[in-house]
Amino acid sequence: MSQYDISELERLIDGELPWARVQEIMKDAKDADRFEKWVAILQARVPWKEPILLPLTTALFIVRKGRQRIVKCRCGHEFGDYRVNWKLAALIHVRETEGQLAEVYRGTEQPDPTWIQIREYTCPGCGTQLEVEAVPRGCPPDFELLPDLDTFYRAWLGRPLPDAVACEDKTLEAMRRWRIEPR
Ligand SMILES: [Zn+2]
């Protein structure tokens, strides 16, 4: 089984390893504790203490906060329960006119504004652009990853998480709470 030291994995994460070395690592068997090393590197880089359960992007993490599992930005901003699409709690900038789309697309690359929207999701805490999606008008925000954390930790890492929760999409439930009841 291959073993890599932390500094080499840090350079891999940061895209600083020569491509030839990256290819060697990609072809080789993964070291058994790669996930733990990867998370430890990322944990050391964030200014907060809640344990990272799973990185979602380079800026977003599912973390354990008390008995909750929430999505948290590297800046510390919290988006809430990881089973609710975090995009609902982000700042959203929509490009939907020809002029707005022309700011990012040229010529024939530009999608048809009568049916496509570009949505840019930004962290309210630090202003990092977290995600961009091009979707048909009316399409709900794409929920890109709802991991089954309990199965992952139990069956793949061999160390079950405390307080197992049902892995179900709670986004619609959260949106129902927005509804304004008629008087
Ligand atoms: Zn942030």
Image: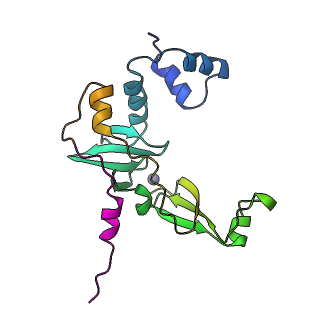
**Is the residue 84 above or below the residue 43 in the image?**
below
Asked if the magenta segment contains residue 77, the reply would be: no
Q: Nearer the viewer, residue 143 or 57?
A: 143
Q: Nearer the viewer, residue 179 or 61?
A: 179
Furthest residue toward bottom? 183
Left or right position of 59 against 162: right
**Is the residue 64 above or below the residue 139 in the image?**
above
Residue positioned 55% across, 26% down in the render:
12
Instruction: Give percent across and percent down for residue 146.
Output: 38, 46
Left or right position of 74 against 106: left
Total labels: the figure holds 0
Instruction: Give percent across and percent down for residue 117.
Output: 61, 65
Left or right position of 127 against 16: left
Asked if the magenta segment contains residue 172, the reply would be: yes
Instruction: Give percent across and percent down for residue 73.
Output: 42, 49
Residue positioned 37% across, 26% down in the render:
36
**Is the residue 169 above or below the residue 29 in the image?**
below
Magenta stretch: give its range: 165-183
Left or right position of 10 against 73: right
